[in-house]
Amino acid sequence: MKKEKKDQRKELLAQSNLRKISAVIPAFNEEKRIGAVINKVKNYVDETLVINDCSSDNTAAVAEKAGAKVISNKINLGYIESIKKGFKHAQGDIIVTLDADGEHRPDEIPILLEPLLDNTADLVLGKRKKIQRISERFLNWLTKFKVKVQDSGTGFKAINKDLALKLVLKGKCICGIFVLEAHSLGAQIAEIPININPVEKKRKIAWHHILQFFFIIYLLINSSCKKSFYYGNQNKQKKQNK
């Protein structure tokens, strides 16, 4: 079974050679973990970009040594502005975003790419089994009034670059707004179950989710959609039944 999965991933990577893949990794004070993440990520993409968000440690130096292209913010801009900068600088046709702390598994990049490579989706979300924060689960519940996704705040995503460059991403975090903006632009969205590596880190109270509520409400009221949606394995089942 493992051999079959490896063969499928090799086939996907060979297919991706027709389209360049960039990884965008926002990072803040991750000198201890960023190197290992890059060493794994670069096996699955053509370009690895680290957006160093004015770290006070050696994140930038470690990332460069590991083989990533590093773009450093002069001041701390936050997650949203960092990924937007990554979108602008990425050379790939498809962009994969993932966290710098090692929580996401780079060996699952191929399964996120699959719907994009076969043109059944414009945005693919890596769906976590469990969303830790109650506030994030609430924001996700709100988002589902417009878009029936299970994990609108995941940091592990794959997206067509032309769609990524159209996103404004006005909010305090990506929860809800990333999916709702893509939805309003007519994007086809897929969700693929992913695994999460256990990472020891302190989880602060996400007070910014209070303000994020209002950004989501605004998009729920004002956004519309022109396309249908594709959700994960449902599309595969339809193909098999034909």
Image: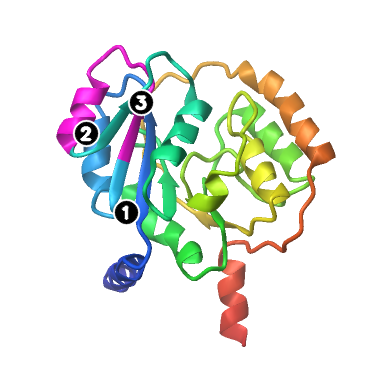
* Amino acid of disc 2: Gly
Q: Secondary structure at mark 3?
A: loop
Residue with the mark numbered 1: 107
Which of the 4 image quadrants contains residue 34? Answer: top left
- Using the image as rendered, state which of residue 224 and residue 138 is in the foreground: 224
Quadrant of the drawing holding the C terminus: bottom right
Residue with the mark numbered 2: 35
* Amino acid of disc 1: Asp
Question: Upstream in the sequence, badge 1 or badge 3?
Answer: 1
Mark 3 neighbour class, 10 Å CA radius: few under 14, some 14 to 19, many 20 or more: few
Residue with the mark numbered 3: 200
Span shown in magenta: 49-66
Verify CB contact (< 8 Å) between mark 2 and mark 1: no
Gap between marks 1 and 3, in whole Å?
21 Å
Q: Is residue 129 visible?
A: no
Mark 1 neighbour class, 10 Å CA radius: few under 14, some 14 to 19, many 20 or more: few
Residue 240 x/y as whole percent: 56, 83
Q: Secondary structure at mark 2?
A: helix
Q: Total label count?
A: 3
Residue 200 x/y as whole percent: 35, 26
Q: Does the magenta-highlighted stretch encompass residue 38?
A: no
Q: Does the magenta-highlighted stretch encompass residue 54?
A: yes
